[in-house]
Image (spheres, rainbow, N blue to C red):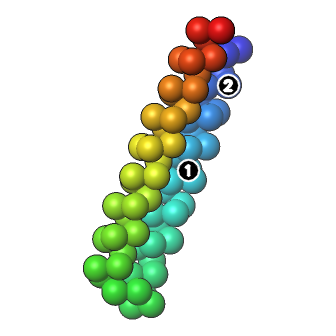
Amino acid sequence: MPGNRALKVVAGIVISFTTLAGTIIFLSAAEIISLGVAILMLVALVGMYVGFGILIAAYRLISKLE
Protein backbone atom coordinates (compact mmCIF):
# COMPACT_ATOMS: atom_id res chain seq x y z
CA MET A 1 0.00 0.00 0.00
CA PRO A 2 2.87 2.53 0.38
CA GLY A 3 3.12 2.85 -3.40
CA ASN A 4 -0.58 3.68 -3.62
CA ARG A 5 -0.22 6.39 -0.96
CA ALA A 6 2.79 7.90 -2.71
CA LEU A 7 0.86 7.98 -5.97
CA LYS A 8 -1.98 9.87 -4.30
CA VAL A 9 0.44 12.41 -2.82
CA VAL A 10 2.13 13.00 -6.17
CA ALA A 11 -1.25 13.32 -7.90
CA GLY A 12 -2.37 15.87 -5.30
CA ILE A 13 0.79 17.91 -5.75
CA VAL A 14 0.45 17.88 -9.54
CA ILE A 15 -3.23 18.84 -9.41
CA SER A 16 -2.64 21.71 -6.96
CA PHE A 17 0.28 23.06 -8.99
CA THR A 18 -1.67 22.84 -12.25
CA THR A 19 -4.68 24.57 -10.69
CA LEU A 20 -2.60 27.44 -9.31
CA ALA A 21 -0.64 27.86 -12.55
CA GLY A 22 -3.87 27.76 -14.57
CA THR A 23 -5.39 30.43 -12.35
CA ILE A 24 -2.37 32.67 -12.86
CA ILE A 25 -2.51 32.16 -16.62
CA PHE A 26 -6.26 32.86 -16.64
CA LEU A 27 -5.76 36.11 -14.71
CA SER A 28 -3.10 37.16 -17.20
CA ALA A 29 -5.27 36.27 -20.21
CA ALA A 30 -8.20 38.22 -18.74
CA GLU A 31 -5.80 41.17 -18.31
CA ILE A 32 -6.49 41.36 -14.59
CA ILE A 33 -2.74 41.16 -14.00
CA SER A 34 0.03 42.14 -16.40
CA LEU A 35 2.24 39.65 -18.20
CA GLY A 36 5.27 40.62 -16.11
CA VAL A 37 3.42 40.01 -12.86
CA ALA A 38 2.11 36.67 -14.18
CA ILE A 39 5.62 35.50 -15.08
CA LEU A 40 6.89 36.59 -11.66
CA MET A 41 4.06 34.70 -9.94
CA LEU A 42 4.76 31.55 -11.97
CA VAL A 43 8.47 31.69 -11.14
CA ALA A 44 7.63 32.17 -7.44
CA LEU A 45 5.19 29.25 -7.57
CA VAL A 46 7.83 26.95 -9.04
CA GLY A 47 10.33 28.17 -6.46
CA MET A 48 7.96 27.47 -3.59
CA TYR A 49 7.21 23.95 -4.79
CA VAL A 50 10.91 23.16 -5.29
CA GLY A 51 11.91 24.76 -1.98
CA PHE A 52 9.28 22.98 0.08
CA GLY A 53 10.10 19.74 -1.71
CA ILE A 54 13.72 20.05 -0.63
CA LEU A 55 12.66 20.84 2.94
CA ILE A 56 10.36 17.82 3.08
CA ALA A 57 13.07 15.55 1.65
CA ALA A 58 15.60 16.84 4.20
CA TYR A 59 13.10 16.33 7.04
CA ARG A 60 12.44 12.75 5.96
CA LEU A 61 16.18 11.99 5.71
CA ILE A 62 16.87 13.50 9.14
CA SER A 63 13.97 11.65 10.75
CA LYS A 64 15.42 8.35 9.51
CA LEU A 65 18.67 9.09 11.35
CA GLU A 66 17.05 8.99 14.76
Report the residue at 52% width, 63% height from top: 20
Residue 4, percent across and down?
A: 65, 22
63 lies above or below 59: above
Where, by quadrant of the figure, is residue 19 drawn? bottom right
Residue beneath label 2, please? 5
Residue type of the residue flagged with mark 1: Ile
- Residue furthest left as drawn: 36
- Residue furthest right as drawn: 1
Residue beneath label 1, please? 15
Report the residue at 46% width, 66% height from top: 22
In the picture, measured across the screen, residue 33 lies left or right of residue 5, that is left
Return the residue nearer the eye: 59 or 22: 59
Residue 29, can we see it?
no
21 lies above or below 25: above
Report the residue at 51% width, 26% height from top: 58
Q: Secondary structure at mark 2?
A: helix
Q: Secondary structure at mark 1?
A: helix
Where, by quadrant of the figure, is residue 32 drawn? bottom left
Residue type of the residue flagged with mark 2: Arg
Disc 2 packing (10 Å; few <14; some 14–19; many ≥20):
few
In the picture, measured across the screen, residue 23 lies left or right of residue 34, that is right
- Residue furthest front as drawn: 66
Q: Quadrant of the C terminus?
A: top right
Whether pointer 1 and pointer 2 mark residues with C-beta atoms closer than 8 Å, the reply is no
Residue 60, percent across and down?
A: 58, 22
